[in-house]
Image (cartoon, rainbow, N blue to C red):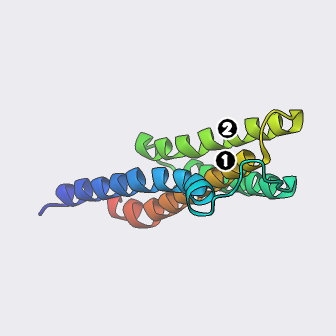
Amino acid sequence: MGEIEKLKKMRYVWALLLGVAYPFTIIYPFADAYLFRHVPPTSAIPFDYSNSLLFTSSILFGFTSLIIVSKEWIDRKVWAVLIPPLVMLVLAGVLIGSLALGSASELSVLLFSSASFNANVVSTGFVIGYVTQVLPKQK
């Protein structure tokens, strides 16, 4: 098997991992709360939990963006990895704003913040894996 086939196979493996990891990490907090633990939607949850999860997610997103920008390569496929975490960050931020206005439940804000954190962990792991595994082979 040639070097090009190995790189192509590796791209498919990375795409498969992301195709499984993103939906799982985004859906898992909701399934855990509603299906497995049967948490009532009107549960009182301190604002600090949601806020700290969103803050940590933002730091991870910035760290991942910094890794991509600091490398002197432009691969649009790697930039696409940042889209799901960015969408989740924006949704969690909007929900925190809605919570402050009184139109969102505390549990939904916590679950979206948790899903945002999980998506950012996946994207950070992917980018670090890509930088350490794929880039050295391309040079």
Residue 70 placement (x, y as % from top left): 59, 52
Going by the image, does 111 lie left or right of 126? right
Give above or below for 107 relative to 133.
above
The mark found on residue 27 in the picture is none
Mark 1 or mark 2: which comes first in sequence? 2
Secondary structure, mark 2, is: helix
Which one is in front, 23 or 124? 23
Callout 2, which amino acid? Leu
Residue 67 visible, this orientation? no
Residue at (61, 49) in percent of width and height: 65
**Which residue is farthest left?**
1
Residue 6 visible, this orientation? yes
Callout 1, which amino acid? Phe
The mark found on residue 91 in the picture is 2
* Residue at mark 1: 112
Residue 101 placement (x, y as % from top left): 88, 33
